[in-house]
Image (cartoon, grey):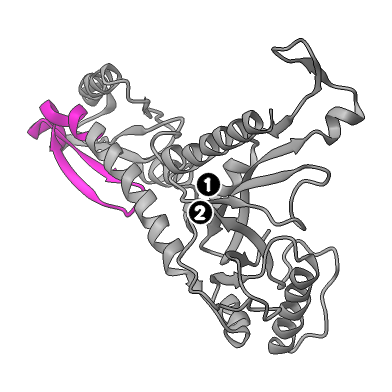
Amino acid sequence: SFDDANVMVRKALDLYRRVYEELLAIPVVPGYKTEKEKFAGGHSTTTVEAYIPVSGRAIQGATSHHLGQNFGKMFDINYQDEKGETQTAWQTSWGLTTRTIGVMIMVHGDDTGLVLPPRVAPLQCVIVPITSKSCPIEKLAPYCGSILESLQEKDIRVKLDDRLIYNPGWKYAHWEQKGVPIRIEVGPRDLEKRGARLVVRFGGEKVDVGVDGLADAVAAKLDEVQKGMFENAVKFRNDHLVKVTEWKDFVPNLELHNLVLTPWCGGEHQDWEEWVKDKSREESLANAGLEGEADTTATSVAAKTLCIPFDQPDLPEGTKCIASGMPATCWVMWGRSY
């Protein structure tokens, strides 16, 4: 039924939200696409929208479509209801793609390389022995091996990098570039004191820990990093999410790399949506002293609707649409998008 399809659409979308927020540590805004942006031929499209800090652009994280009955009628897709009568199926369409990996890289990465959330990192820890003439790898290896085993017993994904052809500095850079959440440095002093140093990829924190509590400390630190990465991304996104009720403030906020919430006359008004896109492009190009941009550019300066958020702020009676001046019926989120 129509309602069954609605439930399926929202279940799939919430799964997307959980993948982004609980695994990838990326906050998203769930909502409906406007008529202009929805899946062509479908009844409605829902989406989760993410924000890329380094570029100030939004990116569509994933969509879940209520296709209605159009495609069922077109391809003669039917079912028999509980009364034995033939009915046209109500269809949905959804799926998660590899774009999630790209979004994660762009949201969390830095100039050094990847910064991976611990829950999805193939390697959560790497142990790097620091050898010397007085403390060769043969002397450190058993101690590093015991640390490796203690972490594996906690189901922590860990590797001992005991390669002899690379020095510790090279290994540090190598694993930082790959985004491994925690590096565990083990040198002669650590062997002597029965400890190790943890170096966190996210934020660069360094902490010395005794070997007896090392596995528990690493597990706790991984949870702390996951939480910290999400909170950091939420703060950055929220700092760049603004409400605008007058057109004069719209493009200036785009130039500040903001996502913009505005009062809107409804997702069905495609003509005014196109007006905003054209007008914002025109003003942005004028501000930059440019005459135009290619119609096929993937990084347009024009604004587009991202979604009509499910979680709607209060809309005072009498509020006007930012473009048409007609009575507003909802808030819509705009931004420059990939």
Q: Residue at x 55, y 59 (%)?
A: 52
The crowding category of the residue bearing disc 1, from other C-alpha atoms within 10 Å (few below 14, some 14 to 19, many at least 20), is many
Residue at disc 1, secondary structure: helix
Q: Position of residue 128 (x, y in %)?
A: 32, 34
Q: Residue at x 91, y 30 (%)?
A: 74
Instruction: Looking at the picture, tell me which residue is in the foreground, 178 or 22.
Output: 22
Q: Is residue 139 magenta?
A: no
Instruction: Looking at the picture, tell me which residue is in the foreground, 262 or 326.
Output: 326
Q: Position of residue 75 (x, y in %)?
A: 90, 26
Above or below for 8 versus 155: below
Q: Is residue 216 magenta?
A: yes
The crowding category of the residue bearing disc 2, from other C-alpha atoms within 10 Å (few below 14, some 14 to 19, many at least 20), is many
Instruction: Looking at the picture, tell me which residue is in the foreground, 267 or 150.
Output: 267
Q: Is residue 116 left or right of residue 332?
A: left
Say which residue label 2 marks: 107
Q: Which residue sits furthest top? A: 84
Above or below for 320 versus 159: below
Say which residue label 1 marks: 104
Question: What's the residue type where badge 2 is placed?
Answer: Val
Q: Position of residue 203 (x, y in %)?
A: 32, 54
Residue at disc 2, secondary structure: helix
Q: Quadrant of the N terminus?
A: top right
Q: Is residue 309 left or right of residue 313?
A: right
Above or below for 41 versus 295: above
Q: Residue at x 15, y 36 (%)?
A: 190
The residue range painted magenta reads 190-218
Q: Position of residue 142 (x, y in %)?
A: 22, 19
Do the numbered discs 2 and 1 sit on residues whose CB atoms are within 8 Å? Answer: yes
Question: What's the residue type where badge 1 is placed?
Answer: Met
